[in-house]
């Protein structure tokens, strides 16, 4: 997408909360502690599973790697908020919907919807995570936590987590096909005219 599509993630243009000024209170690149506190607040308040953090980290890297997005002091919070919102939806069985999430954190519901749409479109709607990707981001996150003496509540990828990733991959595929997913699985389309 064109670079101007990413202005939605810039707090100078779109403040985090409705009615706030367009100038964020923080104008410097955050340190690990600041980011960690923000993420902890998100995950604990929204009751996200710890594994959602691994998935969100993968999403952020996909987003930045897609090109054109600059992760900086003005964009990191809205990017993180969106990545964790989507990760919770993809990973957690019991997650908040956008309206509940917006109400909990004092954000605008339409703003969250727009962020989610821009983010997922930018990563080409690639929301599934392979076991290898999960392991890669798990170890990256663990290294960050060990370097900063933060607690690390995640368990290593095991058969149960691997099965959940596989189910998630199929669910994403089915969701992309919408309510016709089951019918399309059973239909013999090779005979259609």
Image: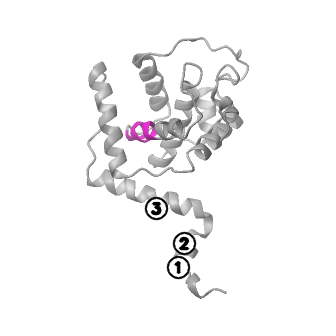
Please give the residue where the numbered disc 1 appears in the rendered image. 186
- Residue 36 falls inside the magenta stretch: no
Mark 1 Cα within 10 Å, few/some/many (few <14, many 20+)? few
The correct choice, above or below, for 127 with respect to 180 in the image is above
Please give the residue where the numbered disc 2 appears in the rendered image. 182
Please give the residue where the numbered disc 3 appears in the rendered image. 170
Q: Tell me the quarter of the picture where residue 114 sits.
A: top right
Which structural element holds mark 2? Answer: helix
What span is in magenta?
51-58
Task: Tell me: 128 left or right of 51.
Answer: right
Q: Earlier in the sequence, mark 1 or mark 3?
A: 3
Quadrant of the image containing the C terminus: bottom right
What type of secondary structure mainly makes up the magenta span?
Answer: helix
Q: Residue at x 33, y 41 (%)?
A: 136
Mark 2 Cα within 10 Å, few/some/many (few <14, many 20+)? few
Q: Earlier in the sequence, mark 3 or mark 2?
A: 3
Q: Which residue reaches farthest right?
A: 19
> Disc 1 to disc 3, how far (Cα)?
15 Å
Which structural element holds mark 3? Answer: helix
Which structural element holds mark 1? Answer: helix
Task: Tell me: 5 left or right of 45.
Answer: right
Q: Name the spot of residue 188 as percent of width and height, x first.
A: 55, 84
């Amino acid at each position: 997408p064109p670079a101007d599509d990413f202005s939605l993630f810039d707090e100078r243009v779109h403040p985090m909360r409705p009615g706030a000024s367009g100038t964020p209170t923080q104008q410097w690149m955050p340190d690990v502690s600041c980011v960690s506190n923000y993420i902890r607040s998100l995950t604990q308040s929204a009751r996200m599973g710890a594994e959602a953090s691994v998935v969100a980290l993968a999403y952020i890297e996909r987003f930045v790697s897609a090109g054109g997005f600059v992760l900086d002091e003005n964009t990191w919070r809205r990017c993180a908020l969106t990545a964790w919102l989507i990760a919770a939806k993809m990973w957690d069985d019991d997650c908040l919907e956008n309206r509940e999430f917006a109400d909990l954190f004092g954000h605008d519901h339409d703003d969250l919807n727009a962020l989610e749409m821009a983010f997922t479109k930018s990563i080409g709607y690639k929301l599934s995570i392979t076991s290898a990707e999960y392991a890669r981001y798990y170890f990256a996150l663990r290294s960050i936590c060990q370097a900063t003496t933060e607690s690390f509540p995640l368990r290593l990828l095991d058969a149960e987590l691997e099965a959940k990733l596989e189910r998630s991959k199929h669910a994403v595929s089915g969701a992309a096909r919408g309510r016709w997913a089951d019918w399309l699985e059973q239909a013999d389309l090779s005979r259609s005219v």
